[in-house]
Amino acid sequence: MPTWMTSGEEASRHLYVRESGGPDYQPFRDVREGPARDLAAKGPCEPCNNGWMNNMDHGVLDLLGPQLIKGKRIKLTKTKKVALAAWAAKYALMFQLTHGRDRRFAIPEADYARFYDERTPGKLMRLWAGYMEPPGKRGGPVLAFTDDTLNETYHDPQMLERAGLSAELASKDYNAVFRFGYCVISLYSARPEILEAVSLANPRAWVQIWPAVGTSEWPPPEPLPTGRVNPHFAGLPVSSS
């Protein structure tokens, strides 16, 4: 967690939750209370970390820090959506690298190479931004500042056939949901054919930021229910209807 994201917050009331899960490994959960801390990703080289990746951080610093994190109403232009989506995809990739090597199952190595080459989420991802009032904000015991989850998913042949898709598209994919203060970002990665069939649990609770199209108001019309972030807030597996 970059320390600049927590600037101005009441450090003593921070709660950090980090977890991952999937069909091929046991769920992992790490909960810590206390002041802001950097959760170091073990992987990026120094030139990348201090170069283009650092530039991505600075590209959203004025957007995330004083606005989205604090729940302020803003207009998300296409340019802002592109910058936010690229940063969020980078965050997801780096988030997996905060886990030990034996728990890096969800995101394949090919996605790291693809992101390095393209510097954008690419055609294999969809991203949305939602709004949630942090638990504990209205007098609760703790302000849950950040809540991160990364999950491996599996689109099996039967599920795909029920959705009218070819069983040959069966694959392991992943989804991630991150909350920073009031801002929730949901990422869903799958084959393009599957992404076309992905639906949102509540479309009025989300602003699509990738693929980026036009200008949108944020927060969206409806807030997300306060609580733990949930991988099924957005990017639901293809439906059976």
Image (tube, rainbow, N blue to C red):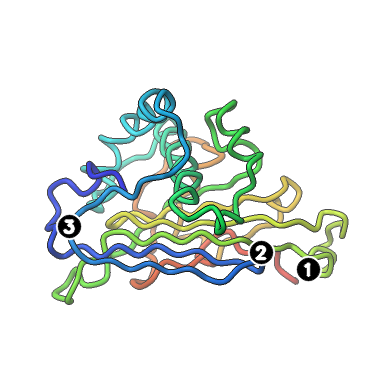
- Left or right of residue 123: residue 71: left
Which residue is labeled 2 in the image? 237
Mark 1 in CB contact with mark 2 (< 8 angstroms): yes
Which residue is labeled 1 in the image? 159
| Mark 3 vs mark 1, CA separation in Å | 44 Å
What residue is drawn where x is 33% and y is 63%?
132
Sequence-first tag of 2 and 3:
3
Measured as percent of width and height from the top left, residue 75 is found at 34, 40
Measured as percent of width and height from the top left, residue 92 is found at 48, 48
Which residue is labeled 3 in the image? 35
Sequence-first tag of 1 and 2:
1
- Left or right of residue 114: residue 47: left
Disc 3 residue type (three-letter): Pro
What residue is drawn where x is 65% and y is 38%?
123
Q: Secondary structure at mark 2?
A: loop
| Mark 1 vs mark 2, CA separation in Å | 9 Å
How packed mark 1 is, by other alpha carbons closer than 10 Å (few <14, some 14-19, many 20 or more), is some
